[in-house]
Image (tube, rainbow, N blue to C red):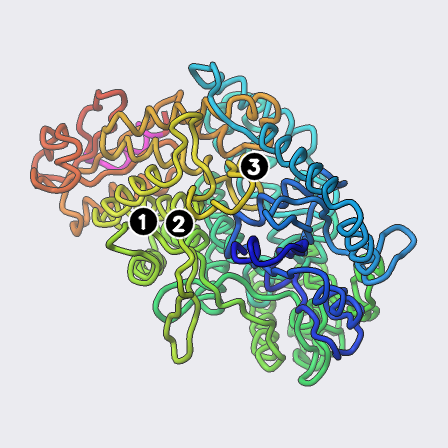
Amino acid sequence: MRSHRTSYNMPTTLWTGTHGDRKPLTRPGKKTSQFSFQNEEIGRLLNEDFVSVKVDREERPDVDKVYMTFVQATSSGGGWPMSVWLTPSLQPFVGGTYFPPEDGLTRVGFRTVLLRIREQWKQNKNALLENSQRVTTALLARSEISTGDRQLPPSAATMNSRCFQQLDEGYDEEYGGFAEAPKFPTPVILNFLFSYWLSHRLTQDGSRAQQMALHTLKMMANGGIRDHVGQGFHRYSTDRQWHVPHFEKMLYDQGQLAVAYSQAFQISGDEFYSDVAKGILQYVARNLSHRSGGFYSAEDADSSPERGMQPREGAFYVWTVKEVQQLLPEPVLGATEPLTSGQLLMKHYGLTEAGNISLSQDPKGELQGQNVLTVRYSLELTAARFGLEVEAVRTLLNTGLEKLFQARKHRPKPHLDSKMLAAWNGLMVSGYAVTGAVLGMERLVNYATNGAKFLKRHMFDVASSRLMRTCYAGSGGTVEHSNPPCWGFLEDYAFVVRGLLDLYEASLESAWLEWALRLQDTQDRLFWDSRGGGYFCSEAELGAGLPLRLKDDQDGAEPSANSVSAHNLLRLHGFTGHKDWIDKCVCLLTAFSERMRRVPVALPEMARALSAHQQTLKQIVICGDPQAKDTKALVQCVHSIYIPNKVLILADGDPSSFLSRQLPFLTTLRRLEDRATAYVCENQACSMPITEPSELRKLLHQ
């Protein structure tokens, strides 16, 4: 982008989007298409009068956030693909989301926009430049986040109560979730509700928070937003019922949802939730994993129904009644009426001859006669309907889904975005580490370990201690990088540090904790705002050509990197005792005080961090041999309980170990009668020694 600033005295047209929502730019001579970027005349106008720049918003989230801030402030909303017109100094003056090629009844066309901008640039360039400068100055003032004259963050009890009330008011009692449509998975909200429940267990609001979170997770898992055949979750539901999704699958959803379902299992003891978590991770291992341990970004929504046909939304995932009948013709023995395996599956998952997708959910008419699998009845109801045993129905449905899965392998697959992002890999390391620890499945923890090894080997520069933002799958299983490399942003550091802390607690290998501390030091050096508090999203040098340097203040589809950093700083203090981590956390929470006070529901993850800070973290110390059965029993006891505000520490008795050097008091804790022994410490005071998991469980439940 910077090269355009001095080379051209013409406006820049910038697009941001991803593999799934950007269409290729046109070249003259290309056939006219319904898409603006494939229209021949639009291509000619762009080539003649504008400098065109196309940006992958996943590779450069800083560029996307700066100009999306402008679009949201100057238009009715935001979305992708986003088009913004910039001055030669990269200051925005016009912007919007997708424009159709030609004018419509309610939307101005892309061609008209280009012609108007060209005319205004020729006749009123100075006025455009002056207005652009005014808008940029106003945005800078509006987007500033700092401590100001505040000394301390607000009351956690007040912020949590207000956030809960706002969520309660918007809750969908019937289907779960917190909006009408479209509905997105919102792990940050579910995490908040679980934490709120824990601190309000004896109140009506606490029970309500738990019910909202568990019900939402169950409705999502039963809906079409979950891929019942191949597992994993689609991007969002187009309807209130979680039925018809936008079929794209994103890595960051899988990582966060695996944690949410694992926590739901900890809280409820219902294996329904643990099965969903395992299914998510099975999907990622099969479809989104590089052989060296890294994780790919996404799978597209569109694919060809048959080879050689035009791609269609959801073609890989939907089914006709005829297909299912042909795949599952076997009669079901013992039913009270004639029944095939296919008919049983179609009844349970709501398939119909005409298709179960309404015209309003299929504006292009691509899915008529097709069905999205969505659970319509409980196993008990389906079994009762046909006079069958519940376990027999479970087995028949699982066998049927497996046959559908094998048949689906022969369909053209959706495009795989084999770009690997450090931030999303960090979220996925957390997904595998937390689920593996909760379920006691070492195999899942190994996936997390391999993911962390991949990050250190392929996305970390040892000399500068910096993370790289991206790498790519090359031919023959190799890993490729851009040249020069795309360096990491705040979210890359925050999410990777969280992943490493989760991995330490799952594996108890202190090398991951040491690397987390090193990355946190680099994060502080590159992104910390020493004047206003909190972290900027990008390095000062990296964003030198942009008109704004922003701090992310929204916990959305992904948590804000500042919210995650607040948690990381608290945990790092628990692991090291270093006071500067707490000081930074308090400063960060204070900087975001105004945003939390105004709209607490916009920052549920930060509200959780605020609560964790004001309640103090538990240090749960296990003294023992990490390979011994009694040590593992105590560790598994800790992992089986939902305790969000804790750090788990293994003290192996070695005074020269990394953790003993960080926390000298560890050397004073002894094993009782040479057995693995647990201590629960708060505010530098530790419990009596505990050797029985049942006793530890009692103490941790208090």
Residue at the (62%, 55%) spot, across then down? 16
| Element type where label 1 sits in the image | helix
**Dot 1 crowding, Cα within 10 Å, few <14, some 14–19, many 20+:** many
> Residue 667 location, x and y as percent?
10, 32
* Residue 398, quarter of the rendered image: bottom right
Vertically, is 159 above or below 58?
Answer: above
Give me the C-alpha separation between circle 1 and circle 2: 7 Å
Taking the magenta stretch, the answer to whether it contains residue 540 is no
Magenta segment, which residues?
691-700
* Residue 686, quarter of the rendered image: top left
> Residue 548 location, x and y as percent?
55, 39
Whether residues under marks 2 and 3 lie with C-beta atoms below 8 angstroms apart, the answer is no
Residue at the (66%, 80%) spot, across then down? 327
- Say which label, 1 or 3, has the lower sequence index: 1
Residue at the (68%, 49%) spot, across then down? 79
Q: Amino acid at mark 2?
A: Ser
Q: Nearer the viewer, residue 407 or 148?
A: 148
| Element type where label 3 sits in the image | loop
Residue 695 in view (yes/no): no
Q: Amino acid at mark 1?
A: Leu
> Residue 234 location, x and y as percent?
61, 58
Q: Which secondary structure dominates the residues rendered in magenta?
A: helix
Whether residues under marks 1 and 2 lie with C-beta atoms below 8 angstroms apart, the answer is yes
Label number found at residue 430 = 2
Label number found at residue 503 = 1
